[in-house]
Image (cartoon, rainbow, N blue to C red):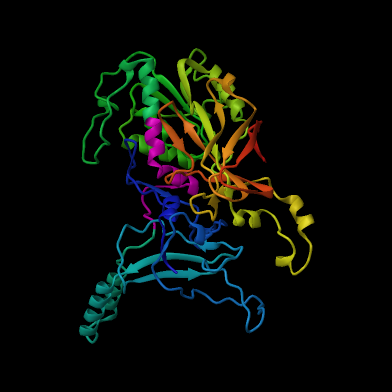
Amino acid sequence: MAVECAEIRRHHRVGTKDIAGVHLPANVKFQSPAYSAVDSGEAAEPYTTEKMSRVPGGYLPLTECFEIMKVDFNSLQLDDEHSLSTSPAEETCWEQAVYPVQALADYWIKPGDRVTMEASCQDCYLRIQSINILHLEHAMEVIHNCTESRDSLSRGNEAELCSALANLQTSRADALGQTCVLEPTEIALLNNLPYHEGFKMAMRKVLSSLAPEKLCQPVDPPCQDTEMNSASGQSAAAPSTSDPFYVLDVSEGFSLLPVIAGTLGEVKPYSSVEKDQHCVTLDLISEANHFPKETLEFWLRHIEDEAAVLQRPKSDKLWSIIILDVIEPSGLIQQEIMEKAAISRCLLQSGGKIFPQYVLMFGMLVESQTLVEESAVQGTEHTLGLNIAPFINQFQVPIRVFLDLSSLPCIPLSQPVELLRLDLMTPYLNTSSREVKVRICRSGRVTAVPFWFHLCLDDEVRLDTSGEASHWKQAAVVLDNPIRVQVGEELVLSVEHHKSNVSITVKQ
């Protein structure tokens, strides 16, 4: 069936043309990997998967369920009365295959409109592509014209009519321009406007404190019809002969932060993107925003050892800002982040900052039978009396990742509490272990401790990894043995942080 789902859309389509003052040009097309033409020779899966019953924000079915293809896998079936379904309406272990519509222009559809698509299975993948919307009034008009002209149409005229019928909104990508393939989390990051606005605000504060005269006033995103000569540069201010601010972004994947930094004045931003198509895309965006040539640099082209990314910009220069990736998209702390922070502190000029400056970890106590059942085999009832739990459960992981707390079936038993602080700028404030008392606000069984983070760029600008616009997921520690609690009781959470790994133990 065809559905409308904002959560899927924001992970597969960039929904804005301006991000924190940076204009995205029309000749740059972003696309997720969940698409590949049947003749492209790509082996990537042309779809993604989702547990549709738990998609944050839900989804709106636009059509009834329809049959795309019937495949007989060696006539495997249970019997004439019993069958298995992977439908979102069924509570099963399966996710559903999702084919995101990526390049279809924004539109409204009404009851009676039709969706057309091409489905094929020429290789090992089912592919759905060439998605079109046929509006009801358009179809009626075409049918009316076709009836009136049926006798007089030649083969050439029929071809013209078919061409007119095909002149609909379509998902075929524009062949012109630069196509940049990004992971769904990278596209969701581009759609995370609070993230980019927060970084822009925090960077402006730091650079202003270092040398206010080097900052330019914020300018409106350039219009395509506006003519700007190359001498005007990125601001109206006269060029300065003083050294620029050096800003290094070593966050993983595609990042627009170096371009945003370049809009703030006399800044020399360095990007650590690795893929050639990402470099080309950032160059096109810089050009569209009228950056002087060579404003944006690609850091990996300047260093000999890619493993040693954290170095001085020049032998006699230091960084004003270093941006680190602290939290993985899965919801866990990045490995070796404290070691990277220690090196970064040695590479900062006086007054320079690491972003984020510190990170706060929050958590809460919940009752979630779903997490319990998905984390370990429970008894023998679901395995037809076979006692496989002792063996299978030896391989269970201590922390569940890639969770969406907003749609996770659970009952909160406490308010969120701060569990840990990781300070990247002042390490003497860090502790490797901490005990936190948590008051129970609802009776039940504590089965898990979900946690998330606030990335504090400074004391005022915070990014919540559990927010609605967040591109991060959340994680949870699932207890081996649930704890029954009553309102008013207090439990103690013992939190330990060692080499970027966090463990949480619940004590009564």
Residue 156 appears in the figure: yes
Magenta stretch encompasses residue 230: no
Asked if 63 appears above or below 154 in the picture, the reply is above
Q: Does 232 sit left or right of 367 as displayed?
A: left
What residue is shown at x 33% (from left), y 27% (from top)? 292
Asked if 310 appears above or below 494 in the picture, the reply is above
Q: Which quadrant of the rendered structure holds the N terminus? A: bottom left
Of residue 143 and residue 464, the one placed in the foreground of this image is: 464
Q: Does 263 sit left or right of 310 as displayed?
A: left
Residue 47 appears in the figure: no
Where residue 228 sits, quadrant-wise, is: top left
Over which residues does the magenta segment extend?
173-200
Residue 508 is situated, as x and y percent measured from the top left of the image, at 67, 40
Q: Does 331 sit left or right of 21 as displayed?
A: right
Where residue 234 sits, quadrant-wise, is: top left
Instruction: Identify the residue at the far bottom of this view.
Output: 151
What residue is shown at x 36% (from left), y 55% (from top)? 174
What residue is shown at x 39% (from left), y 33% (from top)? 198
Residue 164 is situated, as x and y percent measured from the top left of the image, at 27, 70
Magenta stretch encompasses residue 187: yes
Residue 308 is situated, as x and y percent measured from the top left of the image, at 60, 26
